[in-house]
């Protein structure tokens, strides 16, 4: 029996469901396979040999790793018993998979994806690796238990049934993630959020079960408040509360009155960062260990931006992440963008690049000399507002990887489900191995860098001493 959902149908839902079931039964009982996409037909013939209905129906796992000029994948409808599908290097409309009503695991890699709302609701494990979602929302199938997202551009998540989600893995600096979707995830067991500077509504984490394990990295202090952090069952390399507390303190000193105008807030934050951060000369000069230095600075952007021991100077990730963290705390709506080689911030549609501003020279015609912004501040010069913005951006460094879209109205239509609870539970058990392996790889990375954290572990008195000694430039 084919069901659209466990919620009441509208007349239109019932009409579509009836038509869909007729089409699905016709496909399942066909004795002739006629491919619309000849490229795909050739690919299958090369990998499978002769294509017959019997052979196609016997296939449960399928990998398509070729690049097609014809983006029509609707011929996959003939694989009626397909349970696991991996597609690489594709531009795919997922509506082409709507008839694969036995599908349980879907992996999309290095692809541009549209129409996630059409993913079959039988899918209970979904992975996006190095993808771009062309839609404004990522819809999660009705029975989805496991979701893994790595370096994938998307804006928002809409679960059709949030109570099914058990495991959520996100590692992506090109995503702008609203965590509100977690509000009703009553059975979630594990969450991992890594390398994400753009996160909103983290307070939704307070609604998850108390026993849910939450894996966080050094990007979390950018958007996480102390109350929420303390309410979580956090698994981390060290206690992030010290960084969160330090960021809160800096923000409160820079902007003690939240009612001041945004230009004043922007100036205070920018001046503080430029006065206290210095771009790494080792990275600029490509000294012997510069790659390891840059890697550490990128992996721990807040740790080194607030580095008590002044172990390293910084690079662009530390400037941009510290700006993002302080902007979040003083009510400035900022988005951090990244290209392949650089990162910066956007406020009110304008570029802010404190990395470039820190080394920029400003010419004073009256004395025929140029000064850095920090020198002008030390001289007591009044700084015009426009200085903080990057003007006409033409440098390739500013070609962002992904442009953030704002989500449109969310549709409540949940598509179609071929009901089979036993198969769904089997798939969850099978695909859990794939997701656990991702966690294991991350843990190996954590262990490999543990010495770095131990070496620079911050004690309470060190933080207090650093706060007291900081110079807050006005």
Image: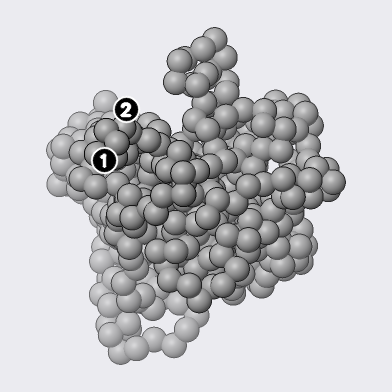
User: Disc 2 designates what residue?
Assistant: 47
Disc 2 is placed on an element classified as helix
The spot of residue 119 in percent (x, y) is 38, 60
What residue is shown at x 72% (from left), y 33% (from top)? 309
Q: Quadrant of the N terminus?
A: bottom left
Q: Compare residues 132 and 311 and report the one nearer the observer.
A: 311
User: Disc 1 designates what residue?
Assistant: 366
Question: Which of pointers 2 and 1 lies earlier in the amino acid sequence?
Answer: 2
In the rendered view, tell whether residue 415 sits above or below residue 338: below
| Residue 241 seen by the camera | yes
Disc 1 is placed on an element classified as loop
The spot of residue 272 in percent (x, y) is 54, 49
* Residue ranking furthest to the front: 367
The spot of residue 174 in percent (x, y) is 41, 47
Q: Compare residues 436 and 399 and report the one nearer the observer.
A: 399
What residue is shown at x 28% (from left), y 77% (from top)? 16
User: From the viewer's perspective, is 82 left or right of 280?
Assistant: left
What residue is shown at x 39% (from left), y 86% (from top)? 9
Pointer 1 local density, CA inside 10 Å: few below 14, some 14–19, many at least 20: few
Residue 276, picture quadrant: top right
Pointer 2 local density, CA inside 10 Å: few below 14, some 14–19, many at least 20: few
């Amino acid at each position: 029996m084919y069901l659209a959902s466990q919620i009441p149908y509208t007349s239109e839902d019932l009409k579509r469901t009836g038509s869909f079931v007729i089409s699905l039964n016709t496909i399942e009982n066909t004795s002739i396979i006629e491919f619309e996409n000849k490229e795909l037909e050739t690919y299958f013939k090369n990998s499978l040999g002769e294509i017959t209905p019997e052979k196609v129906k016997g296939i449960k796992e399928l990998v398509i790793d070729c690049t097609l000029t014809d983006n029509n994948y609707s011929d996959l409808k003939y694989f009626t018993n397909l349970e696991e599908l991996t597609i690489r290097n594709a531009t795919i409309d997922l509506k082409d998979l709507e008839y694969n009503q036995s599908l349980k695991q879907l992996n999309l890699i290095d692809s541009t994806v549209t129409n996630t709302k059409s993913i079959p609701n039988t899918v209970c494990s979904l992975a996006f690796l190095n993808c771009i979602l062309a839609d404004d929302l990522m819809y999660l199938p009705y029975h989805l238990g496991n979701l893994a997202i790595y370096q994938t551009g998307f804006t928002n998540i809409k679960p059709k049934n949030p109570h099914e989600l058990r495991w959520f893995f996100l590692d992506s600096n090109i995503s702008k993630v609203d965590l509100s979707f977690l509000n009703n995830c009553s059975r979630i067991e594990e969450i991992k959020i890594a390398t994400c500077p753009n996160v909103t509504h983290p307070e939704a984490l307070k609604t998850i079960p108390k026993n849910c394990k939450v894996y966080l990295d050094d990007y979390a202090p950018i958007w996480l408040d102390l109350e929420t952090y303390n309410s979580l069952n956090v698994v981390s390399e060290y206690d992030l509360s010290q960084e969160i507390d330090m960021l809160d303190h800096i923000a409160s000193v820079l902007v003690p009155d939240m009612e001041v105008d945004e230009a004043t807030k922007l100036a205070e934050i920018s001046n503080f960062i430029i006065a206290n951060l210095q771009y790494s000369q080792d990275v600029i000069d490509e000294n012997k260990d510069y790659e390891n230095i840059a890697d550490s600075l990128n992996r721990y952007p807040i740790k080194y931006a607030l580095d008590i021991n002044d172990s390293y100077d910084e690079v662009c990730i530390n400037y941009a992440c510290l700006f993002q963290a302080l902007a979040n705390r003083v009510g400035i709506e900022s988005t951090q963008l990244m290209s392949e080689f650089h990162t910066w911030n956007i406020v009110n549609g304008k570029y802010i690049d404190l990395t470039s501003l820190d080394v920029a020279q400003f010419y004073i015609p009256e004395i025929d000399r140029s000064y850095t912004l920090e020198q002008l501040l030390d001289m007591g010069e009044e700084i015009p507002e426009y200085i903080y913005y990057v003007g006409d951006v033409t440098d390739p460094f500013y070609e962002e990887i992904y442009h953030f879209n704002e989500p449109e109205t969310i549709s409540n239509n949940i598509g179609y489900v071929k009901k089979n609870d036993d198969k769904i539970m089997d798939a969850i058990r099978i695909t859990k191995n794939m997701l656990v392996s991702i966690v294991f790889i991350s843990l190996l990375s954590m262990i490999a860098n543990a010495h770095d954290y131990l070496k620079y572990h911050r004690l309470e008195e060190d933080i207090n001493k650093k706060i007291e000694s900081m110079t807050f430039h006005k």
